[in-house]
Amino acid sequence: MAATDVDVFSNEEKRNLSLGGHVGFDSLPDQLVSKSVTQGFCFNILCVGETGIGKSTLMNTLFNTMFENEEASHYQNGVYLRPRTYDLLESNVHLKLTIVDTVGFGDQINKEDSYKPIVDYIDTQFENYLQEELKIKRSLFNYHDTRIHICLYFIAPTGHSLKSLDLVTMKKLDSKVNIIPIIAKADTISKSELHKFKIKIMSELVSNGVQIYQFPTDDEAVSEINSSMNAHLPFAVVGSVEEVKVGNKTVRARQYPWGVVQVENESHCDFVKLREMLIRVNMEDLREQTHARHYELYRRCKLEEMGFKDTDPDSQPFSLQETYEAKRKEFLGDLQRKEEEMRQMFVNKVKETEAELKEKERELHDKFEQLKRMHQEEKRKVEEKRRDLEEEMNAFNRKKVAAETLSLSQPLKKDKDKKN
Amino acid sequence: MTSNIRYKSRIPVKTEDSMEEKQYVGFATLPNQVHRKSVKKGFDFTLMVAGESGMGKSTLVNSLFLTDLYKDRKLLNAEERINQTVEIIKHTVDIEEKGVKLKLTIVDTPGFGDAVNNNECWKPITDYIDQQFEQYFRDESGLNRKNIQDNRVHCCLYFIPPFGHGLRPVDVEFMKALHEKVNIIPLIAKADCLTPNEIKKLKDRIREEIDKFGIKVYQFPECDSDEDEEFKQLDKELKECTPFAVIGSNTVVEARGQRVRGRLYPWGIVEVENQSHCDFVKLRNMLIRSHMHDLKDVTCDVHYENYRAQCIQEMTSKLAQDNRMESPIPILPLSTPDVETEKLIKMKDEELKRMQEMLNKMQQQMHDKEQ
């Protein structure tokens, strides 16, 4: 709970009373436990690491089952996240486990945007939970919580230091999720190199201000083991689902020509420590931290963005309702204004087009008149020409007739001459 | 040292046969003379190593040449590497063995693939290789050719990380940018994180992807047919083993009563020179004991010649366009035969055209006359 919560009982004096006999409320934890067991638990793991670094194998080894997984290719265009949900059962306890894989991480040539899909996914899960919380009719107890409780960051065993991509990604993720860095494929580093490597990694993380998950040391029952484990971070793990016969036992191991690396042997790798910390001791604490710290941070940022404040300018506590109402009115006012604006615009546009159309009409009309006039002109001219032509024809005809009569009288004369 | 030397002594044994003695000329001693002269002259070899940080490049080079080339090296932190550019660093050492001197140059490429944005991170490397070619080209075409320094890169060892499922895009792009400039030998680095089955799968995968993307890695030359069976067998094994899965070590450990180079783990000791542990021995034999000279030959005959031909073509095409430009390298005035024949062809073309036109005209005239 945030420290700014007002303590309701601070005004009253608390008195410690002793009990006369056994009342029975010491069974409260048991009731809580049996309720949670019937409800079932939910746990979400995000595995971030390069393709082929051993994420799927480690998950298989941790939970001692074979989650189906095809090998990813190196040629994805970008990073995308692949969540898979499984239902596991162990001695009556149901666990709804979601494993989210980052496919294509670290493969591209330009990795500047590789962290974005991961951050977006985490934010989306927080957003979904926030929406559910803000609903009027909500059912939080039934809600399938998909918020990421733990991010296992797989570091490649180069033996020198973190890669630049690792540093950039972890810085972006440390305020949103619990990060546990682990050194993958640790059977390629010898003991002395491992020691130096771990120190280098932790110092780089510290000097760059990356906050990784610290196992809690405030609970007495587990503080000792947790603080000793904190010193072993990052865990150097080896994963394997193959079984090899060692001595007279069959253990999960990797067989090399020079020896056998046993997964559960503490002197070979830190797998047992990781399993202990992650599953057997601190799983519940991880869930709590996610809800109490990371989710609350997200929620606060989101609501502040939307304009909600805890106290108004007069330092009086605002209630969510009032703020909500105010926001709603503001929003409706905005809407109305926008509607008006749009209507105005529409009207203006209509006027404009009308004016244009009228212009055009007038122009057409003018043209029509002009053409008509031209047409008349032409007609007149043609008429004139016709008349002229007719006159000419008449004149010509007359001349022809005159000529003919002349010619007729002439041959008579000739005949007359001949006769004579 | 013994089984891998192909050079067999060819000094002819004096036979009792007097007929042969009379016909013996003596040039069969040429190989000996070559041997003697080359020992006197000494050899040089330039090796480039490329790959991401932390792949074990320096350790492998130290193991190969049994020296410590990288004393007091400063490694960068992760935040310094976010925007790192690729540098080229040369280390030159003179080593001698049984009278044979070798001037070894190792070209290192720190920063390759380390930044967050690795676009064109291979450009400084290709530029460097081209620069060496250019320098050799100028020296070769110069007037005084007595002391040419050959700095051309003879071989590039590319380290592929064993943590993935095959080649990554940056590996493919790098090899494609370089395969026509230098002999590339891909290696699987840090092979002690893979079981024998996994090694086999990864090698098959990588070979497949190299074919698929058309990358031309260095190919071993075919055996001569007169070599003995044992050699041919070795050669075949070598070819099937690529890419080599190597492990390097800077430390000497005690294993099976001997002191060997190796890595000490709680579960066992990895011996670098044990053939069943890794392919280091094969790589060393191939690189140093049998194919060093072949690598140099391929660089001179193939990669350098390609570069040279390209260079000259570019220059002559530029000259043709811009006659005023003076070429920095003296080229014979009337250029190469190619350009001459081109001119001839052009002339002939024009002649043909003219004749064609005349023919057409005459035909037309005849046609008109007929009509």
Image: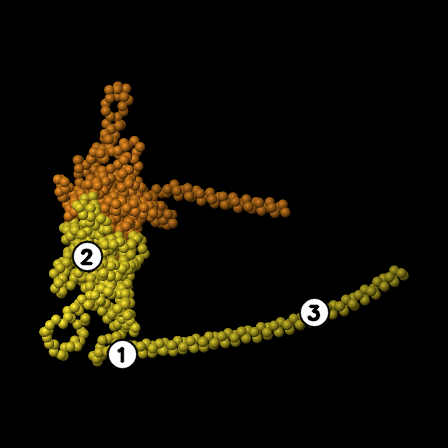
Question: Chain for mark 2?
Answer: A
Residue nearer the viewer, A49 or A346: A49
Query: Residue drawn 35% across and 45% down?
Result: B313
Q: Are marks 1 and 2 in contact (CB under 8 Å)?
A: no
Instruction: Give the CA distance from mark 3 to mark 1.
Output: 100 Å
Identify the amino acid type marked 1. Answer: Glu
Residue A267 in view in this figure: yes
Residues flagged by tags 2 and 3 on a common chain: yes
Query: Residue drawn 78% across and 67% down?
Result: A401
Q: Specify the label residue A389 is tagged with.
A: 3
The x, y position of residue B154, in whole percent, is 26, 43
Q: How many marks?
A: 3
Quadrant (top left, top right, bottom left, bottom right) of the C terminus of chain A: bottom right
In front of the other: label 1 or label 2? 2
Residues flagged by tags 3 and 1 on a common chain: yes
Question: Chain for mark 1?
Answer: A
Query: Residue drawn 20% across and 52% down?
Result: A238
Residues flagged by tags 1 and 2 on a common chain: yes
Colour for chain B in the figure: orange
Identify the amino acid type marked 2. Answer: Arg
Residue nearer the viewer, A100 or B40: A100
Question: Looking at the rendering, which quadrant does residue A337 occupy?
Answer: bottom left
Q: Which residue is mark 1?
A: A322
Q: Which chain is yellow?
A: A
Answer with mark 1 or mark 2, whichever residue precedes in sequence: 2
Residue B54 in view in this figure: no
Secondary structure under badge 3?
helix
Residue nearer the viewer, B168 or B38: B168
Instruction: Please say which color scheme the image uses.
Output: by chain
Q: Which residue is mark 2?
A: A275
